[in-house]
Image (tube, rainbow, N blue to C red):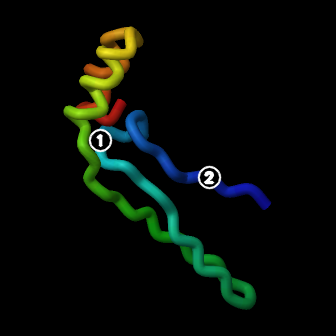
């Protein structure tokens, strides 16, 4: 079973925070909760630009797209 709901930088749902999933597995039942946490978006955007990556990658971080 592979489950990857984590995202940092491009969650594509309009929420720019980093996300991860908590999965509780019980007998005959699975419950998931998506958690969001803040991270240093401005610092990450600067690093993208400083490393010569395309500027649109830095610009999208704060939009969550």
Tag on residue 1? none
- The answer to which of marks 1 and 2 sits earlier in the sequence is 2
State the residue position of label 2.
4
Residue 28's place in the image compared with 3, above or below, is below
Kindly state the secondary structure of the residue where label 1 is placed.
loop
Give the quadrant of residue 49. Answer: top left
- The answer to the question of whether label 1 and label 2 lie on touching residues, with beta carbons closer than 8 A, is no
Give the quadrant of residue 16. Answer: top left
Q: Is residue 12 visible?
A: no
Residue at mark 1 to residue at mark 2: CA–CA distance: 17 Å
Task: Tell me if mark 1 has few (under 14), some (14-19) or many (20+) residues whose alpha carbon lies within 10 angstroms of its own.
Answer: many
Q: Is residue 26 left or right of residue 18?
A: right
Give the quadrant of residue 24. Answer: bottom right
Kindly state the secondary structure of the residue where label 2 is placed.
loop
At a point 66% along the width and 81% down the height, the residue shown is 25
Query: Residue 7 at x, y = what percent?
Result: 47, 45
State the residue position of label 1.
16
Quadrant into which the N terminus falls: bottom right
Q: Is residue 49 visible?
A: yes
At a point 30% along the width and 32% down the height, the residue shown is 44
Q: Is residue 22 left or right of residue 30?
A: left
Seen as rendered, the residue at the extreme right is 1
Query: Residue 21 at x, y = what percent?
Result: 51, 63
Given residues 65 and 49, the one toward you in this image is 49
Task: Tell me if mark 2 has few (under 14), some (14-19) or many (20+) residues whose alpha carbon lies within 10 angstroms of its own.
Answer: few
Count of all numbered marks drawn on residues in the image: 2
Query: Residue 10 at x, y = what percent?
Result: 41, 34
Seen as rendered, the residue at the extreme front is 50
At a point 31% along the width and 58% down the height, the residue shown is 37
Quadrant into which the C terminus falls: top left
């Amino acid at each position: 079973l592979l489950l990857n709901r984590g995202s940092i930088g491009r969650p594509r749902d309009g929420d720019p925070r980093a996300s991860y999933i908590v999965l509780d597995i019980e007998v005959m039942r699975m419950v998931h909760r998506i958690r969001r946490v803040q991270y240093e978006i401005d610092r990450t955007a600067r690093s993208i630009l400083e490393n010569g990556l395309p500027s649109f990658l830095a610009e999208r971080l704060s939009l969550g797209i």
